Image (cartoon, rainbow, N blue to C red):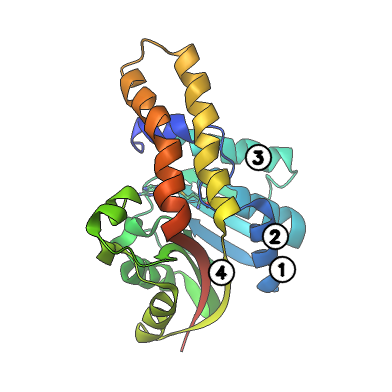
Amino acid sequence: MDIPRIFNITESAHRIHNPFTPDKFATLGTALHLEPGARVLDLGSGSGEMLCTWARDHGIFGTGIDMSQLFSEQAKLRAEELGVAHQVKFIHDDAAGYVSDEKVDVAACIGATWIAGGVAGTIELLARSLRSGGIILIGEPYWRQLPSTEDIAKGCLANLISDFLVLPELISSFGALGYDVVEMVLANQDGWDRYEAAKWLTMRRWLDANPDDELANEVRAQLTSEPKRHAAYTREYLGWGVFALMPG
Ligand code: SAH
């Protein structure tokens, strides 16, 4: 079981697989007033940077589930590197339907809400692991500028304009699901560059080392087109943020 191999190639050198930079996760951790010993569940935990740094900086205990074997292994190495391997556990598995045995203080899905069929389904899934008074974290894109055509949405790698909302509407959608938005930290264009532009050097180096790989043509095509696509579309039109929610 794994995610499509192309992501394990293009994001192999990423510590954070979304437009957040380390300072944004630090800001979020501080903003949530995490107590030492707090339990955090993270569905789609990637390479584990959020849980590992919060374990180091705030003394939290975390469990992450991710379907990428590579990212899950990198998360375990990162935990050892930061000296928090006794505080965090990373499970290589499909997070669909995952509910923790013990209720958690924070239940998160940061940039992987397709795991439960979208934002509403993911909130519902996370709520099943949450203690009363706990916080749900959702990382999700929104339109910085509403695209005027469907082609622009496709340029942002969305299927449709309706895949995402503008920020005020995304915020009010949480209210419509019965949640208070109690905090938020938003990414910015520099963060998008760290997520997207960091793939380009990884792709180039991988191509140099793997010219005969079955994915070489696909990676070559992406390396050629992605910098301009990112500059024209994602960087201008897409926002991204993490929203902290409590049931109303
Ligand atoms: N939250 C992480 C990773 C976000 S990228 C971070 O902020 O860095 C999306 C992640 O979802 C990837 O790590 C991918 O491997 C994982 N993923 C995709 N489908 C999944 C599934 N069904 N179950 C668990 N993880 C999944």
| CB-based contact (under 8 Å), mark 4 and mark 2 | no
Find residue 231 and report its horizontal and vertical position in percent.
Answer: 46, 46
Question: What amino acid is at disc 4?
Answer: Val
Quadrant where the N terminus lies?
top left
Q: Secondary structure at mark 4?
A: strand
Q: CA distance from mark 2 to mark 3?
A: 16 Å
Residue 26 — which label?
Answer: 2
| CB-based contact (under 8 Å), mark 3 and mark 1 | no
Vertical arrangement, residue 86 with respect to residue 116, above or below: above
Q: Residue furthest top?
A: 212
Find residue 80 and report its horizontal and vertical position in percent.
Answer: 70, 39
Q: CA distance from mark 3 to mark 4?
A: 21 Å
Residue 121's image quarter? Answer: bottom left
Which residue was labeled with disc 1?
30
Q: How crowded is the residue under tag 2: few (<14 C-alpha within 10 Å), some, or many (20+)?
A: some
Q: CA distance from mark 3 to mark 1?
A: 21 Å
Residue 57 — which label?
Answer: none
Q: How crowded is the residue under tag 4: few (<14 C-alpha within 10 Å), some, or many (20+)?
A: many
Of residues 34 and 204, the one nearer the viewer is 204
Q: How crowded is the residue under tag 3: few (<14 C-alpha within 10 Å), some, or many (20+)?
A: many
Residue 145's image quarter? Answer: bottom left
243 to the left or right of 53: left
Which residue was labeled with disc 4?
106
Of residues 98 and 187, the one nearer the viewer is 187
| CB-based contact (under 8 Å), mark 2 and mark 1 | yes
Question: What amino acid is at disc 1?
Answer: Thr
